Image: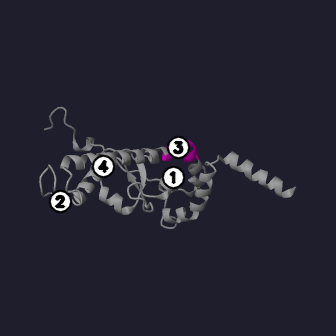
Amino acid sequence: MCGRGRGNAHDIKVRRRRRFMIWEWLAVLTANNGECVYCSARSQTMDHVIAFADGGADELTNLVPACHDCNRRKSDKTPPVWFIGMDLAIRWWGNGTPQGGSGLGDSSMSLREMYLSIHKEVLTLLDDLDTVAAEIADPKRRKWFEDRYWLHGYPSASYGVPRARKQAEQRIKEEKERGYPSVSDEFARRMGLRGHVGT
């Protein structure tokens, strides 16, 4: 017998990941100059900054470009937790004392000093994440990607994200330099060019 306040198994709502369209993939993967926000390698996938498994939104506002290695290693951790753990695993050997002498190349640093230096690096990482998130969320940029690539639909076996990215990459770079013009601005520019060719 179920007590009050307890839900039945059928009352549990299961969150399902949404499927992203090609224009959304391109908008995320080409942000940050097409580089992983964590290591600067070429981006290959989208990472949920706040893990979907932990309740993070399955929206562009919670996605950043990442390489497969960083995405896998970060897993369901937040960027600060992952970065601190990774950094301490490299620099803190676990021997010595909390007052110093236990890290690689940081033998004079205490655990406190090491954490404070990592803390500054984490704040820089968070600033970088905010910058990339603002780029992805930019309404003019998003509209540009949606207008140009919405008709490509969803990734499929015959037309996946790597192929779409390869075909679109040069155009995306050129249009970024132009400030992602609207369809009407682009049309007017092209018509203006055609008018000059004929005169």
Q: Position of residue 17 (x, y in %)?
A: 38, 51
- Furthest residue toward top: 4
Ranked by sequence position, the earlier of labels 4 and 1 is 1
Q: Nearer the viewer, mark 2 or mark 4?
A: 2
Region of the chain picked out in magenta, as a range: 135-143
Residue at the spot of label 3: 138
Mark 2: amino acid: Trp
Can residue 136 be found in the magenta stretch?
A: yes
Residue of label 1: 27
- The dot on residue 13 is none
Q: Earlier in the sequence, mark 3 or mark 4?
A: 4
* First-in-chain label (3 vs 2): 2
Residue 67 at what x, y percent from top left?
40, 61
- Marks 3 and 2, how far apart in space? 43 Å
Please identify, in this view, whether the residue under mark 4 or under mark 1 is nearer the observer: 1
Q: Say which quadrant the C terminus sits in.
A: bottom right
Can residue 190 be seen here? The reply is yes
Q: Earlier in the sequence, mark 2 or mark 4?
A: 4
Q: Position of residue 20 (x, y in %)?
A: 46, 53
Spatial distance from mark 2 to mark 4, Cα to Cα?
31 Å
Q: Are marks 2 and 4 in contact (CB under 8 Å)?
A: no
State the CA–CA distance, disc 1 to disc 3: 10 Å
